[in-house]
Amino acid sequence: MEPWPRPTTSTSATCERPLTGTPPTSASRWRKNSLTLLSPPTGGVFRNQPSHLHQVYPEEPLHAEQRFLSWFYDTILSARADYRVTWYMSWSPCFECAEEVVSFLGEHENVSLSISASRLYKRDDQGQQEGLRLLDQAGAEVAMMSPEDFEYCWDNFVDNRGMSFWYWKGIRRNYHALDDELKEILWTHQCALRLPVLALEGGRHSVQPKRTSERCLPGSPGPRGHPLRGLPRRPRAEPGTPSTSGPDTGSSLLFTCDLQQAAEGSPLSRKAEPALGTMAGSKLPWKEGYPPKPWPRNPMQKLHADYFNFHFTNELTPKGRNGCYICYEVRGNHSPIPLARGVFENQFYPKKRLHTEICFLNWFKESPLEKTPGPGEQYDITWYMSWSPCVECAKQVAEFLNTHKHVRLRITFSRLYHSKKQEYRQGLRSLAGAGAEVAVMSPKNIKYCWNNFVDKRRWSSWYWPDIHINYDALHKTLTEILRPRMDKDIFIENFGPQMPHETYLCYEVEQPEGDSGIPEDQLKGFLRNQGADTPEETRHAELCFLDRIRSWGLDRNEHYSITVFISWSPCPDCALSLVGFLRENSLVSLRIFAARIHSYIEGYEDGLRQLKAAVAQISIMDIPEYKRCWDTFVDHQGRPFEPGDDLCAHIRKESQMLDNILKGSGK
């Protein structure tokens, strides 16, 4: 019978070197196996070294976790490199193995570990539960394997001979039940310590302990304040003695081991290709100075610091930012702390290509949060995105919000995606119309992401040149995009040659350079008269506009230019009010373009002449003004303005009438 002295490597290795031979053994507690292997693999399989084989294979029984640690220490580990290790296990670790892993992580802070288990080992045993909590407190990500994880393992670790993964009956129901049980195990310890909780992260539960000198943990802090250094360790079993703390046979461990930062001379730095995680056979171009990282599964708990700096910079026209990331938080109205927090990225090979927004929606729809909301539960979701949503994603997110009224979404992004294309602008407006709060990430938002979503080891701070200048420019562009627009049918009906029953007024204001007295979202806009079909007091559109101007508190020592496009020319009373305003504000210039003459009230001619005498410019709207209004104030959804022959005839008629009035010759 052949023993199992080395891992079975999968075909997902991205770089290999010749056979290294058997490494020398050591007295170190991690060097228990002598291994011969191809190094470095990106994935492989370990199983228990069962006790019933100790006569055939004369070494002490070892669990799969212990065998991995022994192999990893002897053949891969270097103090000058960072590693991200992922385990997919048939059983969750026993208490003894959990202690071994905790001690290993405490001594090697350059190793991060994610553990996904198919089943909970002796889940009712308090000792085994404590082992899981120790792992969680040591910084390991502890989770149950989701159906997607099983499919990933089938595709990457199993000799499946071309067969697709067959989902077992009840696989998702069992996953949610086990996931809830694991959450309860970890939550018990979190509540006892009164620590900030990240209760659900796509099936990953973790605690961010407060870094204080007093800790509610057994043992004293060890070197550099690691929370679990100094814990008493359970003595190892003597060679040949069966272990009683875990499964003796039938436990397997599938792993991926990804180098995060290769150091010169380390085993993984030889012939290192810019490969992306476990993407077998895929060689993609890489950016100079942009160190390759493995692509972890969605969602991630943290984002690499250099990835954040590269993808979230708010440069107006950056190059090479082809991916998109979402740092998300989910909060409930019954809890002051986030229910979930993490990072999503675009999904690609080997899965179906999906944008990061859709990855989040799919995850949220399948999460226990969405499946079992409490009575009256309202979810507040915040997205911090590297790019604003594309057209299709905006459409799907808007549809999601329209069908999930108990979800409120705030979207902030570092940069605008295709901000000059009308269809992308319309996508952002559709999000706002569906109730989403849409904004550009401010420097304060970026700092919040850095502190809460970034694995910033060895990075003390961040700063991007022109971060405030870029934010102001992006914010101004977004404000213009989201400014309310008039429905195209309303514009055609009220500004066309027909005779409307309402008055609409569109305006633009140019204020002095450096003057921020007028709110940015009110520099352009439109309003209508308050009439019989509104609950407000009857009031003409011109008077409503003057009320808005007075609310700005204009500096009477500064020059302002105001352009008005109105569907009816001012009546005599409104004309007198405008004349009074111009006399009070002598440095304000006013231009009025009317679609037609309001000739149904006696004295309208005198009102128009007084406006002209007050140095107000008044004209009939011509085709250039119609196009300007159409492009600036109308939600035309990409359609160009197309004037008809009847409009041209209407313009000629009204222009002649106004010319006669201003010359004093009547109609």
Image (cartoon, rainbow, N blue to C red):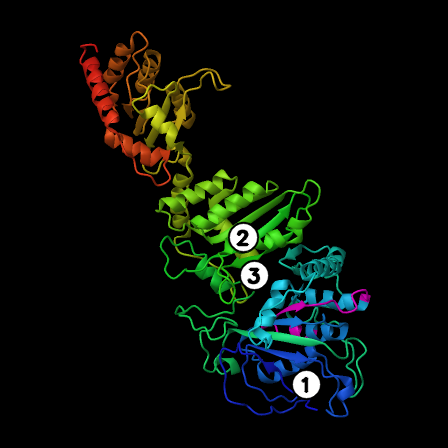
User: SS of the residue at dot 2?
Assistant: helix
Circle 2: residue type: Tyr
Q: Is residue 577 above or below residue 120?
A: above
Q: Are marks 1 and 3 in contact (CB under 8 Å)?
A: no
Q: Residue sitting at 21 percent across and 11 percent down?
A: 667
- Residue 153 horizontal/vertical position (percent): 60, 71
First reached walking from the N terminus: tag 1 or tag 3: 1
Magenta stretch in the rendered image: 103-126
Res. 28 mark:
1
User: SS of the residue at dot 3?
Assistant: loop
Circle 3: residue type: Asn
What is the spatial separation of the Cα atoms under label 1 and label 2, in whole angstroms? Answer: 42 Å
Reading the image, the residue beneath label 3 is 298
Side (left or right) of 484 relative to 77: left
Which corner quadrant holds the N terminus? bottom right
Q: Are marks 1 and 2 in contact (CB under 8 Å)?
A: no
